Amino acid sequence: MTLLRGGIGRLGASSAGLRRGVGRQLCRFPRPALATVLGRDISIGILREDYDKWERRVPITPDHVKHLIDNYKGDDKLTGIYVQPSQRIFPDSQYEKAGAIVTEDLSQVDVLLGVKRVADEENLIPNKTYMFFSHVIKGQPENMELLKTIIEKNIQLFDYEAIAEDVKDPTTGKLKKRRLVAFGKYAGIAGMIDTLQCLGRRLLASGYSTPFLNVSPAYVYYDLDDARRGIRDIGNRIEKDGLPGTLEPLVFAFTGSGNVTNGALEIFKLLPHKMITLEEARDLKSKKGPQNCLYGVMVQQEDIVKKTVGQEGSFDVKHYRANPSEYESTFASNVAPVCNVIVNGIYWDERYPRLLTKQEMSDLYKQGNKSLFAVGDISCDVNGSIEFLQQTTTIDKPFFSWNPTTNKAVDDINEDGVAVMGVDILPTELSVESSKHFGDALLPLLKQLILDGYSGDGKDFEKLPPELVNACIARDGSLTPNFEYIEALMKRPAMIHHDLRDPHVLLRIKGHLFDSGLINQILDVIERLDCHFEIEECSVTPTVNGIPHKSVLMLRVFSEDDSKLDSVITKVDMLLHLIDSAEASMQHFENRPQSSQSKDSSGKSKVRVLGEKEKQVLILGAGKVAGSCAEYLGRSKSTTVAVASMFEDEAMAVAKNASRGKAVTCDLSQPGDKLRHLIEDADVVVSLLPAPLHPMVAQECISLKTDLVTASYESDEMRALCSSSEDAGVSILNEVGLDPGMDHMSAMKIIDNVHERGGEVTSFSSVCGGLPAPEAANNPLLYKFSWSPLGVLRASQNDATYRRDGQVLQVSGTNLLASAEPFYAWKSLNLECLPNRDSLIYGEKYGIQSSNTIFRGTLRYQGFSSLLHVFQNMGILNDKETGATTWHDTLEKLQRDRGFHDLRTFLLSCSDGDKDLATRVNACMLWLGLKIAPVSDPSSMVKSFCDLLEQHLQFEESERDMVLMHHDIKAIFDDGSSENHSCSMQLFGDNTTTAMSKTVGYTAAIGTKLILDGFERKGLLLPTSKDIYTPSLDLLKEEGIIFEEHVHVEQDYDEVV
């Protein structure tokens, strides 16, 4: 994603200007009103926690409040402490008892304390001092508006995340930053409690009732003492009654040695237990009979890795941390086979081998080893050390089950997989202890502010403890020097198209970039060498459960001078070695035209690329399905995804889904120099534009020798380009979406298999539909839009032709909606089916010309088609002028033009005399506001109706869409046998992506990936051939889009006899 430009001579701003000038010129205000005169007393406020419903921690407890009031109130030190009402772990009454004043109004308070950031930045009070976790120091995009508001309102912000001290790593001897407010121990405690509950549910799925079922989630316990009592009670039951006799001895493997693991062990040791070695754990496997205790193994680093072949010497932890690439994991063979629960508290990043991969876990299952019941991944690295932690979990839904056989995660815990806990805000579950710990760390700093009577001016600021000075993000209406680099990251939304053919290097740097100050040093290097830069990506992974995670910065550095680009690489690499605390690594990709400026056959400059070759994908269109396409293609760090749209905000919204996405504005409705330039820069173009625009795009791609992918039906105009695309050596892959696309692939897989075995298809029926999930079908039309509303209405008026039992049937577009028939493949869904276009052309495409039945249909809920047919009869679906500016007047004109004097008789006539249907239509019109709403586009009746439908038929935030696809295929064979094949796919959307966007966007992206990866056939292509549909279906399966196939075989009676 192109985030920011910098550089003298290109946009008039160097990186120095960016960080030292722009940041300080955002705005100027009076200094924060902590205290206007040195020595004046100050007041403290505690903010309401409204950012996360589960956040019940507080910055200081009632005991801390009482201590401050008892010791500092009066004597010109502390005026008072004021508390906003909130649902904290400590009730407001306790704060009042401690001497605080509970009030909504904190406008007169000097220092305002919270845990998390405020939910609405507009509630920030100007000219105040705030302390909270802002999550801005790594340039987190979601919090940049918060930071801008803080600067604009002249707020002085201290961030707890930046309150740190220098400590020496006992292993490496290097200095590292250690946060003074850290919650690792409480993450370990809460994580262990939740893991025990997870284990109980997993054992129940296997038929074992154990005391672990009675372990409550950590947040249910009032405090840690309450939790300890609960766990001890569980331990007493295990010690007294034992675990089920048929259950093998339970072995818990603990990884890591820090606060997280120590916290987990603190809970584990409240249960009857024995700590044993790995060797002793192997011997336990033969032990039978009921167990009255648990077994724990502390997994050491030498237990989980070994030197790779060719590397000599014994294990040395310093060598391992310095040279992790010389080691490989042995966890899968050495630890996983003997443990039942993994409690993972280890630090991990991409330099290190994983503890356990998906493939290794799958191999264990294939070998019959299914002993691993549960994983409590407290370190919470998604796709990290435990690769099958595919998502973080929430306090509401803390567990999921991963099936090693299908490589699929499901919400329900079952006996077919490993139960996984991956909650990423575990300390919140122990709010009492976390708050006490928090306040204990914060209290000395608050005392210092009170005693110094801190006024907020420059002299007083310099007198603050260094821990606070270094934690100040903003003051005086600008960023402080240590954090001026954030200004570059605040510019990310201003994405501008850049010519990637200019000489440049792409640097991908991963490490602790922000708290180590490395990012400042890198920008200084670029500044001194007078180079320009673009920040392509800033991927921030916050500290989770007390464990630090690394961030990724990807930036392009441009210069016409090769020697300067070489110097950038050299000097940044040197910085990485000098700043040990960053623990950073770098990859670089060079894109520099050779001195001869040689051209390839397409006229493009040849580019020298070191490392993985960079690829450029251009997505035309930013509609409802473009985001998932950009996200899938953007997973590759070597692929730049440009999203072009007429509207910048839409392009930006789609481009941000790709790790290296950028937005460009362009008129895509007609050829032009800018569109040609974009296509020329791309390796592959993905056109998600309306189908009538594809031929124009295809002609441009052919002339520029750029491959093209579309998700639309292949039109006659596109087919006319077959020979010219072959002559140009260009691949044009059409119909790679849902329908068309996945329908071709899944059907041809069956048809080809029948043909390869000498069979003949005698009947083919294929249906598909994009619908709201049943619980979301809550309107008169039983429909909501997950793709283009105009596309839905146009599809409902296409002519249709199909063959049924040898008879060819034709349905005109005017009668299509009246031809809907019930459909029963999903018994629990009340569906109807409409014929879809010309089904007979698929006889030739699929090689089933002789089939007695060839039918393709569209699914809707029953009742949709009849309602829409009435609207069609009324003339509302016509693409003509409305003749009025309101729908009331438009409806009157429609009925007058047809000779009706009132709406009731008009509706009854359009409903073919069906009074019940006319009543439903009238109710639907009232629900839509069709009788009172203004017309949005008087030039087009149908577009105005679409706007009204889109306004009312949108999915709510908590609602899901659903995609259905089903084939029925019958075949006969020479031996007289016959086969009835059924193939079904049902997919629901989730809280991030609709099912429609996944099925269309991912499929188009997979087709694009095949071409990027070197697919060789040229010309017009469809996904009906094995070399396309086989890898595509495999890749779709990896995304959880799976077709369930069933076949019923009938033998000829004479043959059986």
Image (cartoon, helix red, strand yellow):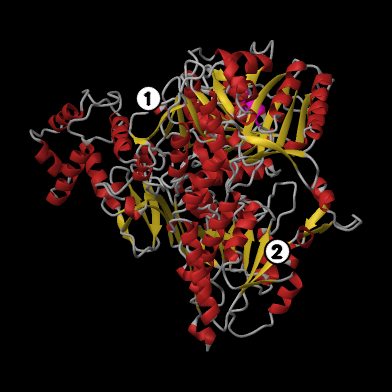
Residue 176's label in the rendered image is none
Q: Nearer the viewer, residue 194 or 330?
A: 194
In this picture, residue 907 sits left or right of residue 946: left
Tell me which label, 1 or 2, sits earlier in the chain. Answer: 1
Determine which quarter of the picture holds residue 949.
top left
> Which residue is found at the position 67% from the left and 13% from the top?
10
Q: Nearer the viewer, residue 809 or 672?
A: 672
The residue type indicated by label 2 comes to Met
Magenta segment range? 677-682
SS state under label 2: strand
Q: Nearer the viewer, residue 260 or 857?
A: 260
Residue position for label 2: 298
Q: Residues within 10 Å of mark 1 (few under 14, many from 20)?
A: few
Q: Position of residue 592 (x, y in %)?
A: 78, 25
Q: Residue furthest left?
A: 901
Q: Tell me the quarter of the image containing the N terminus.
A: top right
Q: Position of residue 472 (x, y in %)?
A: 58, 26
Q: Is residue 733 above or below residue 744?
A: above
Q: Is residue 226 above or below residue 159?
A: below
Can see residue 243? no
Residue position for label 1: 107
Q: Nearer the viewer, residue 491 or 36?
A: 36
In this picture, residue 898 sits left or right of residue 803: left
Q: Position of residue 943 (x, y in %)?
A: 32, 31
